[in-house]
Image (cartoon, rainbow, N blue to C red):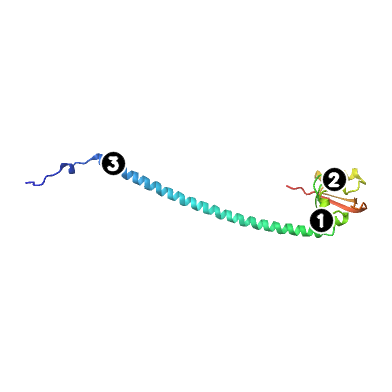
């Protein structure tokens, strides 16, 4: 009646093989999901870095504009300073000369380089040191915003001249 021989092995379930296939399928899905998440993280990071780069470029452009504006302002200041009709001297709190204009150089007879290696008190005549030192100290200590004195100064050739000394304290931050 049955002429073919039936292999019983084909009809019996091998639960071990079924379990192995399930585990392999889960591992494949896990690997695929992990790879997908890694790709998403990489894309998100690329967007983040791109945004940060754009922000940095904007910051660089802004800083270059500020730097250029500051440079132009400094050039304007220097032009005004150098061409002003009054002698101007910038000193620190110890009286060391930091900057002078051309007019101050003409008035004293010293070159700008010579003046930059001097202290303002090397040029000032000591006619009234006590009262004026008191005023200088008040200015230095911030008790007054400015002082105005008439002073005598020494020229390089030994002659003296009178000048109106107006001082304002500007403190660098």
Answer yes or no: is residue 143 visible: no
Q: How far apart are labels 2 and 3 at the CA level?
A: 94 Å
Q: Quadrant of residue 18?
A: top left
> Which comes before the other along the chain, label 2 or label 3?
3
Q: Residues within 10 Å of mark 3 (few under 14, many from 20)?
A: few
The percent coordinates of residue 24 (x first, y second) are 31, 43
- Quadrant location of residue 131? top right
Look at the numbered disc 2 and give the secondary structure of its residue. helix
**Inter-mark Cα distance, 1 to 3:** 92 Å
Residue 159 spot, x, y in % from top left: 93, 53
Q: Which residue is mark 1?
A: 101
Nearer to me, 96 or 35: 96
Element type at mark 3: helix
Q: Is residue 106 visible from the viewing direction of this image? A: yes
Mark drawn on residue 20: 3
Q: Are marks 1 and 3 in contact (CB under 8 Å)?
A: no
N-terminal label among 1 and 2: 1
Does 67 sit left or right of 125 as displayed?
A: left
Determine contact: label 1, label 2, CB under 8 Å: no
Q: Of discs 2 and 3, which sits in the foreground?
A: 3
Identify the disc placed on residue 165.
Answer: none
Residue 138: image location, x then y, percent? 83, 44
What residue would you read off at disc 2? 136
Is residue 68 positioned above or below 91 on the image?
below
């Amino acid at each position: 009646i049955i002429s073919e021989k039936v292999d019983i092995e084909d009809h019996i379930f091998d639960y071990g093989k079924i379990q192995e296939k399930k585990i392999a399928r889960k591992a494949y899905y896990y690997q695929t999901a992990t790879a997908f998440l890694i790709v998403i993280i990489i894309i998100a990071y690329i967007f983040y870095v791109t945004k940060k780069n754009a922000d940095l470029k904007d910051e660089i452009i802004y800083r270059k504009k500020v730097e250029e504006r500051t440079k132009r302002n400094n050039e304007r200041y220097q032009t005004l300073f150098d061409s002003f009709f009054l002698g101007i001297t910038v000193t620190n709190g110890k009286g060391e000369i930091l900057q002078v204009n051309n007019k101050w150089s003409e008035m004293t007879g010293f070159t700008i380089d010579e003046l930059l290696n001097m202290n303002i008190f090397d040029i000032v005549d000591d006619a009234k040191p006590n009262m004026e030192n008191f005023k200088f100290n008040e200015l230095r200590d911030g008790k007054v915003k400015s002082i105005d004195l008439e002073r005598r100064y020494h020229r390089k050739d030994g002659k003296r001249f009178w000048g109106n000394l107006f001082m304002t304290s500007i403190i660098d931050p």
